[in-house]
Image (cartoon, rainbow, N blue to C red):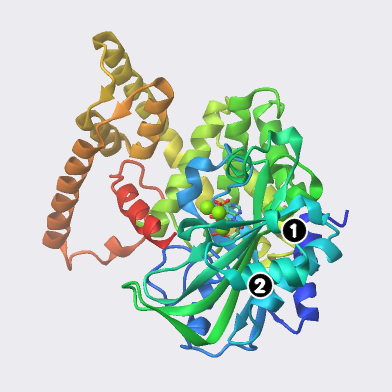
Amino acid sequence: QWTGLNDLREKYLSFFESKNHTRMASASLVPQGDKSLLLINSGMAPLKKFFLGQATPPNKRVTTCQKCIRTPDIESVGKTARHGTYFEMLGNFSFGDYFKTEAIEWAWEFLTKTLGIPAEKLWITIFESDDEAEQIWENHIGIPHDRIIRLGKKDNFWEHGSGPCGPCSEIHFDRGEAYGPFESFEQASDCDRVIEIWNLVFSQFDSDGEGHYAEMKNKNIDTGMGLERLACVMQGVDNIFEVDTVQNIMKHISSIAGIEYKKDAKKDVSLRVITDHIRSTTFMVGDGILPSNEGRGYVLRRLLRRAARHGRLLGVKRPFLTEVCDTVINENANAYPELAEKRDYIKKIIGVEEEAFAKTIDKGTELLNQFTEKLAAEGGKVLSGDDAFKLSDTYGFPIDLTEEICEEKGYTVDRDRFTELAKEQRARAKADHAAKAGSSWADNSIKVDAPATIFTGYTDFEAEDAEIQ
Ligand code: ATP
Ligand code: MG
Ligand code: MG
Ligand code: MG
């Protein structure tokens, strides 16, 4: 099957090698020497040093397939056709070498010639004032004028604080009538009829962060195409979790749960959520991240616990994540052999975390049920911050889980009060820690088996992650 995920990855990288790009391996999910980012979320992120001139790339033209994590997309996972917290991003990069014309020309050549996607299924967006891009698409490539959509800064301008930035142009695939009507480009995108597949960033300005943009002498190209999305389109499947290698993971979960996919919409969401989260966590542990209560470790913990909980929603009563982890490793061992080398280690970390969570989740769920029954009897709609805090403080029940379960039952949570209590708790812990300082080097060791802990990291990492998107 030449449209397999692994074949498409190889096709892309060798296509850009044929355009004199140097193929570089995916960097770790953990950013190296970059404190502005919690986790690598794009192909460009680990190459920033080359764009900023802080390091010299092996070639002015580089191509990669980069592992990415995007936790801000977590709520969309399993619900949209196109979002995972984990995905691979294909990219071609120019460090002061080629620019718009070649980037557009090669993207078009790859999609329509190499892969044979019919031109009439593709739509182009450009930044509203980027006449140059429009001119290339229309006159050089021959795209009809009404298939080129001008969009504003939110969608088609890439910028992160100060520094290199610029307009972008995106390529979208129309999956046709079966996915809904086409009343407008925006509406068709919202219902996943039209799927964004490739983003071409034209990094041509240097921003001072205060609204002044200077044209750069050395202009850069940074492109990103989701490999799972491309495979989804090429394989004609409904969503990224039905792509060949990813589907095998989902099938394994269905067989453990003893349920069939596509029989119950709610269960399908759980199947896709678990499929996604076990992929992200396997790769995160593979890159050396350990479960903890802050930063990356908390992202990992949250994803694992969420996967475990969705397993329970499917009726799985025993720990099962390490078994699925095996399938993730098998499906990815060709492209990422290091996963197979670390198989036992990865499964150990995930297994310990799942077991620890299993102990707390039953008690926590029971207590939460009592709280919501009380609310129902009183006709209340909001779970108090004190109750939410009790769940997290005593039972290690993560606040996002409390919120998710409450939402399912039609309640909200007093998040402000919860945050207040969590802050107080953190201050107490700090004071306590300071009092004990020097007495125990073991405090620095990472506890993978601590069940009852304070989950205060959520707010922090969300805020942190929100900034980087
Ligand atoms: P969307 O609008 O669909 O959320 P995006 O505009 O946030 O996507 P970009 O930041 O432009 O995405 O990233 C470049 C490419 O990476 C996208 O065109 C898409 O193919 C892929 N991609 C982005 N986010 C995800 C995700 N959560 N899961 C899978 N692929 C993704
Ligand atoms: Mg997005
Ligand atoms: Mg987009
Ligand atoms: Mg985009």
Q: Quadrant of residue 378?
A: top left
Looking at the image, which residue is at 72% across and 65% down? 335
Give the camera-side residue of 183 and 401: 183
Q: Quadrant of residue 98?
A: bottom right
In the shown orientation, is residue 401 left or right of residue 326?
left
Which residue matches tag 2?
64
Q: Is residue 401 above or below residue 408?
A: below
Which percent across, then down, holds residue 151? 54, 56
Looking at the image, which residue is at 63% across and 41% down? 188
Q: Report crowding for label 1: few under 14, some 14 to 19, many 20 or more residues within 10 A (C-alpha).
A: few
Q: Is residue 112 above or below residue 229?
A: below
Q: Residue 448 has which mark?
A: none
Which percent across, then down, holds residue 120? 80, 52
Q: Earlier in the sequence, mark 2 or mark 1?
A: 2
Which percent across, then down, holds residue 467? 37, 60
Secondary structure of the residue carrying tag 1 is: loop
> How far apart are the two marked residues, 2 and 1, measured between alpha carbons?
31 Å
Q: Which quarter of the figure is the C terminus placed in? A: bottom left
Q: Quadrant of residue 402?
A: top left
- The amino acid type found where label 2 is placed reads Thr
